[in-house]
Image (cartoon, rainbow, N blue to C red):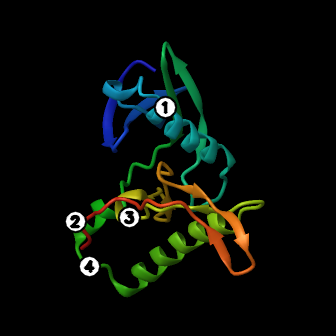
Amino acid sequence: MKEATLIGEGAYGEVYLVKWRGTEVAAKTIRASIASNPMVKNAFMKELALWKKLRHPNIVQFLGVLKQSDRLIFLTEYLRNGSLYDQLRKKGKLDPLTAVAYALDIARGMNYLHQLKPHSIIHRDLTPRNVLQDEAGHLKVTDFGLSKIAQQKDSYGYKMTGGTGSCTEYY
């Protein structure tokens, strides 16, 4: 992993496009300026633990973990078509058939997360920036940094901790 191009930034992490074993992949790591913060490291490790459990056509595929000196990096598939946010900015309003197809892709990914056993995963940051398009035109949910595992409270619902996802512009 020699050359890296920054392709995304979040509150704690940076995502780079890198070549790994001859394949372009996305590599997420903690921002260097805060990498030594124990709370940030803990949040990163929780996200990594979630990614390891996930495998679904509408969830960005986790590939593995690299350890370079003190930095932990996890790898996912790279989707060169970008995010739903990028598409909406370029094209504007979606035609009805595309909108329905996209909604179904996102719903399938979210349903998978919510149906996981023994505990559901609640994404908490589902925005157009966190939905990527694959080469076939299907959408995949990504970025589990704010996700929580729902702990069953009783037969009427789930117990969740506070906190919400990011604010974003919608088009």
Secondary element at tag 3:
loop
* Among the two numbered marks 2 and 3 on one chain, the one whose residue lies closer to the N terminus: 2
Mark 2 Cα shell of 10 Å, populated few (<14), some (14-19), many (≥20): few
Disc 1 to disc 4, how far (Cα)?
39 Å
Residue under pointer 3: 127
Residue lying furthest top? 69
Q: Mark 3 near mark 1, Cβ–Cβ under 8 Å?
A: no
Of tags 1 and 2, the one toward the viewer is 1
Give me the C-alpha separation between circle 4 and circle 3.
16 Å
| Residue 15, x across and y down, in percent | 38, 38
Q: Label 4 neighbourhood size at 10 Å, few (<14), some (14-19), many (20+)?
A: few
Disc 1 residue crowd, few under 14, some 14–19, many 20+, Cα 10 Å: some
- The amino acid type, in three-letter code, at marker 3 is Thr
- Residue designated by label 4: 93
Estimate the spatial distance between the alpha carbons at disc 1 and disc 2, rounded to whole Å: 33 Å
User: Which of the pair 25/74 is nearer the observer?
Assistant: 74
Residue matched to label 2: 89
Give SS at disc 4: loop
